[in-house]
Amino acid sequence: MIRTAHDFAARIAADEAGVGARFFAKLRRVPGVVPFAGEALAAFYCATDRATPAWVKATLLGALAYFIAPADSIPDFIAALGYTDDAAVLLGAVKAVSSHIRPEHRARAEAFLADAG
């Protein structure tokens, strides 16, 4: 249970570590299939930026956790529909915190995609 600001910070750090490994593993498994990969990467880089406020990190990490979850509202293996729920959750979170996603986050995302492609 989160009772203090310290507990909240510790929980975000743990979530960041857990999401990070699984997030990149999923992106590597489905290259070119996820049309919102750039936004997802920018969200990840924002969430892991030390300058990002805790509430923004929590918002983005929650959306990224939904993306990497093995079971969700619309299973990812369903052609043409599998990632629509993931996209809606992630893009809603990105829109809510868009002022915190800086150009350097987007540049890192673009560089990653260029190197991966």
Image (spheres, helix red, strand yellow):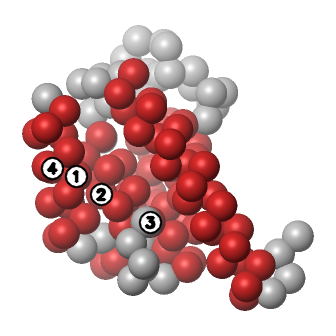
Q: Amino acid at mark 3?
A: Ala
**Is the residue marked by circle 4 packed among few (<14), some (14-19), or many (20+) residues within 10 Å?**
some
CB-based contact (under 8 Å), mark 1 and mark 2:
yes
Relative vertical location of residue 58 with respect to residue 38 in this rendering, above or below: below
SS of the residue under disc 3: helix
SS of the residue under disc 2: helix
Instruction: Mark 3 or mark 4: name the one nearer the start of the chain.
Output: 3
Specify whether 84 is left or right of 22: left
Q: Is residue 62 visible?
A: no
- Residue 50 location, x and y as percent? 42, 78
Q: Which residue is mark 1?
A: 109
Q: Is residue 12 visible?
A: yes
Which mark, by number, is residue 110?
A: 4
Quadrant of the frame with the C terminus: top left
* Alpha carbon separation for disc pair 4 and 1: 4 Å
- Residue 12 location, x and y as percent? 63, 68
Q: Which residue is mark 2?
A: 42
CB-based contact (under 8 Å), mark 4 and mark 1:
yes
Which mark, by number, is residue 47?
A: 3
